[in-house]
Amino acid sequence: EMNGFAGARAGLGLGDGAEGGASERAELSRLLHDGVPHALRARVWLHASGMARVRVRFPHHYAQMLEVGMRLAEEDRSEIEIDLPRTFPNHPLFGDSGSELAPIGRTALRNVLLAFSAHNQSGGYCQALNFLCAMLLLVTDLKEEPAFWLLLAIVDIVPDFYSRYMTGIRIEQNIFARLTRAALPRLAAHFDQVCLPLSIVTTNWFMCLFANTLPAETVLRVWDVLLSPSAGSGPGLGG
């Protein structure tokens, strides 16, 4: 099934994820840029990214990947376990409440990250994905399967952000540094003067796609644009 899944995704470039022709995709992109009502976000993002179609074609994929994920090596599973209590610790769905029972959101977060790690055979789990996944679970009302598909969509949109060498992050950091020099030369000069690379501050912004930096509603608006059908054809996050 994995080969079939890869083939299905190969035909869904960022610009053609949504159904319909070019004019329909352009209209959908415009609406997404204007903002999506929160109650509709999960459904709209699934359709805009093209994952709604892939989800229908592979209805058992999440359950299968979760089963595989539960059997991953202890070392791989421990990386996820370490990050669980670090994820939005002040949020009632994810943080410790003093009860002996694990927060309900943490259980869902663990499951989706295990399934993702099993699915992502080339790289497994990467730090920062916990914040992306937690935000998606909030959007999907803790429904694990749609959060899983949306996580796959976002990782596709920002290629090589979460790979071994994080090439995509380094490229975007270079673009952002040049943009900062052009738009905020005094700030860039100050960073140079104190010998502090801008990336020391901003890498976390990009790795978490601002999920732990900006207010939640602002993050969701950024992700509305990120998941729009035209996202793959425009400038990178740093531009």
Image (cartoon, grey):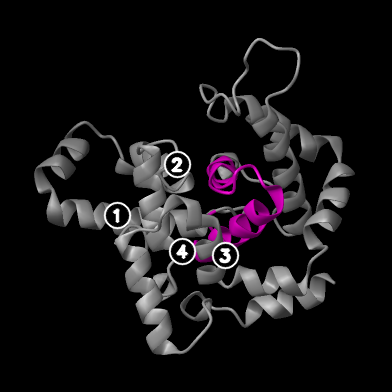
Q: Which residue is mark 3?
A: 46
Dot 3 and dot 4 residues touching (CB under 8 Å): no
Depth check, mark 1 against mark 2: the one in front is 2
Q: Secondary structure at mark 2?
A: loop
Q: Secondary structure at mark 4?
A: loop
First of labels 3, 1 by sequence position: 3
| Left or right: where 64 falls relative to 237 | right
Give the residues in magenta.
Answer: 132-161
| Left or right: where 228 falls relative to 13 | left
Q: Secondary structure at mark 3?
A: helix
Q: Which mark is residue 146?
A: none
Residue 165 falls inside the magenta stretch: no
Q: Residue furthest left?
A: 186
The span from disc 3 to disc 4 (Cα, nearest Å) is 9 Å
Q: Secondary structure at mark 1?
A: helix
Residue in view at x 59 percent, y 49 percent: 140
Q: Which residue is mark 1?
A: 176
Please identify the dominant SS of the magenta region.
Answer: helix
First of labels 2, 4 by sequence position: 2
Depth check, mark 4 against mark 1: the one in front is 4
Q: Which residue is mark 2?
A: 211
Residue 149 falls inside the magenta stretch: yes
Residue in view at x 65 percent, y 10 percent: 98
Depth check, mark 3 against mark 4: the one in front is 3
Depth check, mark 3 against mark 1: the one in front is 3
Q: Which residue is mark 4?
A: 227
Q: Nearer the viewer, residue 145 or 116?
A: 145
The span from disc 3 to disc 1 (Cα, nearest Å) is 28 Å
Dot 3 and dot 1 residues touching (CB under 8 Å): no
